[in-house]
Image: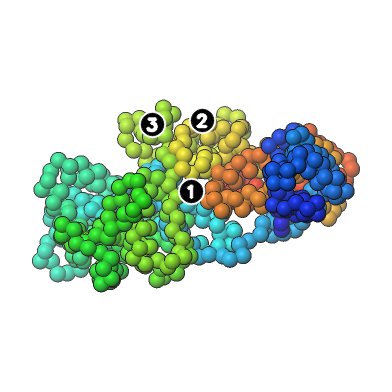
């Protein structure tokens, strides 16, 4: 369906043309004074300059024509030359009835769908997930759903970090603790045990300890580097340990992502790019894209107009070892080969922006991607604690994601137990859904690139611009519908929405019609916060309507049927939107 703005645009542009003006002046926007009108056109002000006429004259001419048009309830020319418009109630009712019957609620799917790979999550083997990974996962999951709803073919890839020096560090750390393990016996020829030689918590202990040690002990650091190199070149024992690390880590990661309602289509890893590296290196050398600098193989990515430093991409270190640059470039080769994507989107902390700019430049310059392949970097801001500093645990450490999730769900649980009578099991279940909504909405309602403050109290509040408030509204609508169905179970009517009979009802209708515009701009700008804003406004409009309207007590069955149809549409749209954001509603709360 065309959006309401598009429909009004057509009418207003036609009028400008009819009066001999360029139709571009007929562009309409939502009103920035909703107390005066719903839509506005400021084109007469600009047209006045071109046609050397007083703007108000032009506005009046346009209004004269459009006054007869049945979609407008009110249209007027306002000094110095604004055109203010308010639409007819019938128009909204018709529009909503069409939305209701459309499976995407009137949203027009992409005419030229792209194949898109989204690289998000980016967890690292042997390191627990922390809040930075949460942002990537939460934002990526939502963008994946939004782009998919828009009609694109989207492939979400976790792109596990399993290939860098941290692997060598963990193996070196393990060797120090358990030097007698068969993996470290260079003469061992037999099969390695199926059982991992460590538990998850041991593994998570080894990495930070090894990382600390490597800072103060150069010998240990060298050993870890050497082990990394051997691992990347297929050392049997280290490969076996590394596979155990993958197993142990991945099953735990999957468990936590599931709690977060995040799911990847692919669990590819940095190491999966390894088989592409040798060919890529040859290709870069043969085509003279790469040069040797102090023994290392690099590709320059500087451009003349640069105002900051763009260090070259490092393809191979002087000892032949590969780096983060290498795997990312080889991963692009792999993705092009496996999926031939039109677009690849990376979602990480915005501190990696320069890094990805370099990678993108390199991939373009060396033609690892096609000329029209779009490479997007989406950098997110930091989640800060209440003091405005990056969020930390009480003792200053990095908070594990699992602990963070638990804190939020516990808070919701307490709120439920304080205010409602619900048995403990149900309250736990409800709290886990509401907690995830609180966390995700708290994150996604901010513009992605902005830092934001993590505030458990505010995020879990059932009032205000929060996930729980949205869910509460959903639950409220469900309960009205359940009551209605009980009341009228023997006298079902065909659903239809009638023109509004009160200003609050009209406002609610107006708000619903914005759905397709919002999804469109959320898709184009890759901005989930636009959906949050929309559902917050929608929930508010619904609640104002609800407080002024006695739906269940209404005796006029037609009126009641129309209201029920209307709030069913509100419910369906809210449910769709929270699904696009990546959370779910409980049955009650
Ligand atoms: N594992 C990385 C990290 O923890 C994020 C990976 C992002 N994706 C990529 N293709 N480099 O910072």
Up-down: is 297 above or below 446? below
Q: CA distance from mark 1 to mark 2?
A: 22 Å
Please give the residue where the numbered disc 2 appears in the rendered image: 457
Earlier sequence position, callout 1 versus callout 3 = 1
Q: Quadrant of the C terminus?
A: top right
Q: Residue at x 34, y 54 (%)?
A: 303
Residue 457 x, y percent position in the rendering: 51, 30
Q: Quadrant of the N terminus?
A: bottom right
Q: Dot 2 surroundings within 10 Å: few (below 14), some, or many (20 or more)?
A: few
Nearer the observer: mark 2 or 3; the answer is: 3
Q: Is residue 307 left or right of residue 178?
A: right
Residue 355 x, y percent position in the rendering: 34, 51
Please give the residue where the numbered disc 1 appears in the rendered image: 139
Q: Dot 3 surroundings within 10 Å: few (below 14), some, or many (20 or more)?
A: few
Q: CA distance from mark 2 to mark 3?
A: 18 Å
Residue 350 x, y percent position in the rendering: 40, 45
Do labels 1 and 2 touch, CB within 8 Å? no
Answer with the quarter of the image where residue 363 lies.
bottom left
Helix, strand or loop under label 1: helix
Q: Is residue 334 left or right of residue 553?
A: left
Q: Residue at x 63, y 39 (%)?
A: 536
Asked if one can make out residue 511 in the rendered structure from this viewpoint, the answer is no
Q: Which mark is residue 389?
A: 3
Earlier sequence position, callout 1 versus callout 2 = 1
Up-down: is 151 above or below 88? below
Q: CA distance from mark 1 to mark 3?
A: 21 Å
Earlier sequence position, callout 2 versus callout 3 = 3
């Amino acid at each position: 369906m065309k959006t309401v703005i598009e429909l009004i645009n057509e009418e207003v542009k036609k009028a400008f043309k009819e009066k001999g003006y360029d139709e571009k002046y007929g562009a309409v926007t939502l009103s920035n004074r909703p107390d005066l009108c719903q839509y506005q056109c400021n084109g007469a002000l600009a047209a006045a300059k071109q046609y050397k006429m007083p703007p108000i004259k032009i506005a009046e001419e346009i209004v004269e024509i459009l006054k007869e048009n049945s979609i407008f309830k009110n249209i007027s020319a306002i000094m110095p030359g604004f055109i203010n418009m308010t639409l007819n109630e019938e128009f909204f009712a018709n529009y909503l009835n069409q939305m209701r019957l459309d499976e995407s609620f009137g949203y027009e799917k992409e005419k030229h769908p792209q194949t898109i790979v989204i690289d998000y999550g980016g967890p690292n083997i042997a390191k627990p997930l922390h809040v930075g990974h949460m942002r990537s996962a939460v934002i990526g999951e939502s963008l994946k759903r939004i782009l998919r709803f828009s009609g694109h073919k989207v492939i979400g890839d976790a792109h596990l970090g399993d290939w860098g020096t941290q692997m060598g560090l963990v193996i070196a750390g393990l060797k120090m603790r358990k030097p007698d393990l068969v993996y470290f016996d260079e003469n061992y020829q037999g099969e390695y045990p199926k059982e991992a030689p460590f538990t998850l918590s041991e593994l998570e202990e080894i990495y930070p300890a090894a990382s600390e040690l490597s800072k103060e002990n150069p010998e240990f650091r060298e050993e870890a580097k050497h082990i990394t190199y051997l691992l990347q070149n297929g050392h049997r024992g280290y490969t076996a340990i590394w596979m155990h690390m993958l197993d142990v880590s991945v099953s735990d990661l999957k468990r936590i992502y599931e709690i977060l309602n995040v799911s990847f289509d692919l669990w590819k890893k940095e190491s999966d790019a390894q088989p592409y590296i040798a060919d890529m290196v040859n290709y870069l050398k043969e085509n003279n894209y790469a040069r040797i600098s102090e023994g290392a193989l690099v590709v320059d990515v500087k451009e003349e107009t640069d105002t900051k430093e763009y260090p070259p991409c490092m393809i191979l270190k002087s000892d032949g070892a590969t780096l983060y640059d290498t795997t990312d470039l080889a991963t692009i080769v792999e993705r092009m080969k496996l999926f031939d994507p039109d677009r690849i989107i990376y979602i990480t902390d915005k501190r990696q922006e320069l890094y990805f700019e370099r990678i993108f430049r390199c991939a373009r310059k060396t033609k690892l991607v096609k000329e029209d392949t779009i490479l997007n970097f989406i950098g997110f801001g930091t989640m800060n604690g209440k003091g405005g500093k990056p969020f930390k645990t009480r003792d200053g450490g990095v908070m594990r994601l699992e602990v963070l999730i638990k804190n939020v769900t516990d808070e919701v649980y307490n709120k439920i137990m304080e205010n409602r009578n619900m048995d403990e099991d149900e309250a736990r279940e409800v709290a886990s859904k509401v907690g995830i909504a609180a966390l995700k909405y708290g994150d996604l309602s901010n513009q992605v690139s902005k830092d934001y403050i993590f505030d458990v109290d505010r995020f879990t509040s059932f009032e205000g611009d929060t996930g729980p408030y949205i869910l509460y509204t959903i639950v409220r609508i469900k309960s009205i519908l359940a009551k209605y169905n009980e009341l009228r179970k023997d006298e079902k009517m065909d659903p239809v929405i009638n023109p509004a009979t009160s200003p609050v009802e009209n406002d609610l209708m107006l708000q619903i019609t914005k759905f397709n515009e919002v999804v469109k701009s959320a898709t184009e700008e890759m901005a989930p916060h636009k959906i949050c804003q929309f559902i917050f406004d929608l929930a508010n409009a619904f609640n104002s309507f609800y407080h002024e309207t006695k739906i269940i007590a209404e005796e006029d069955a037609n009126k009641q049927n129309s209201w029920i149809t209307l709030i069913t549409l509100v419910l369906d749209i809210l449910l769709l939107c929270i699904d696009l954001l990546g959370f779910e509603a409980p049955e009650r709360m």
